[in-house]
Image (spheres, rainbow, N blue to C red):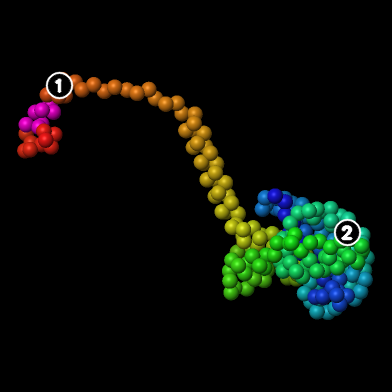
Amino acid sequence: MREVILDTETTGVDPASGHRVVEIGCIELIDGVRSGQFFQAYLNPERDMPEEAFRIHGISGEFLKDKPGFAEIVDSFLTFIADSPLVIHNAAFDMRFINAELERVGFPPLPFDRAIDTVTMARKKFPGSPANLDALCKRFNIDLSSRTKHGALLDSELLAEVYIELLGGKQAALALDANKNSDAQALAKAETKSALPPREFPILPEEIEAHELMLGKLKKPIWTN
């Protein structure tokens, strides 16, 4: 099964107020394992970068001046995600921004039911506990040393690790595979094992005599009842 981890960085919190996507990062998972394939793009938002947003991700308006607009990368982005489920932390936020960008360049929006929200997963698994990405990384002992600022590709890499843990973790999957292999090997061995022919063990006369002598030494042996 193919899934795509997706994250964005933006100029603000509301696309309806004119805020734009400035980075998209995607990681491909195949059967819950990172394949090594990814998509990443910085985007020119064609507007200023508010200081509050810059403090979060460290992406400046100056840095983005020569980057492509969303229209220039939309085809490669849609090709990468294809029709795979999208694993997103706080999916409503990123889906709103992606769909705003798609609609701006004349593409239909992505259906919201394509998204798997890891915030919802975390709250169900750990009710009452923090469900932000930093807290989940700490819970699962995922290294955060490289995360001095938010970044769409970096956060997608971290989210991939968190998502795998939320599904049960690598070790559980490996143990399950090992059990399956052991069971399959045992079954194959049992199926190839040929049945042994029945054997007869006749009682010898001296054995009968020895048994009767032993009974004579016992008080009320059960064998004579």
- Residue drawn at 67 percent across, 71 percent down: 132
Q: Residue at x 60, y 54 (%)?
A: 170
**Picture mark count:** 2
Q: Is residue 115 left or right of residue 77?
A: left
Q: Looking at the picture, does residue 53 appear above or below residue 25?
A: below
Q: Position of residue 118 (x, y in %)?
A: 67, 65
- What residue does disc 2 label? 74
* Residue depicted at 51% across the width and 41% down the height: 183
| Residue type pointed to by label 1 | Glu
Identified by mark 2, the residue type is Val
Occupied quadrant, residue 126:
bottom right
Image spot of residue 51 (x, y percent): 83, 79
Q: CA distance from mark 1 to mark 2?
A: 95 Å
Is label 2 in a helix, a strand or a loop?
helix
Near mark 1 (Cα within 10 A), the count class, few <14, some 14-19 or many ≥20, is few
Quadrant housing residue 69: bottom right
Residue 102 position (above or below residue 196): below
* Residue 41 x %, y %: 84, 61
Locate the C terminus and report the quarter of the image it occupies.
Answer: top left
Left or right, 171 with reference to 200: right
Magenta range is 210-216
Judging by the rendered image, the residue that carries numbered circle 1 is 206
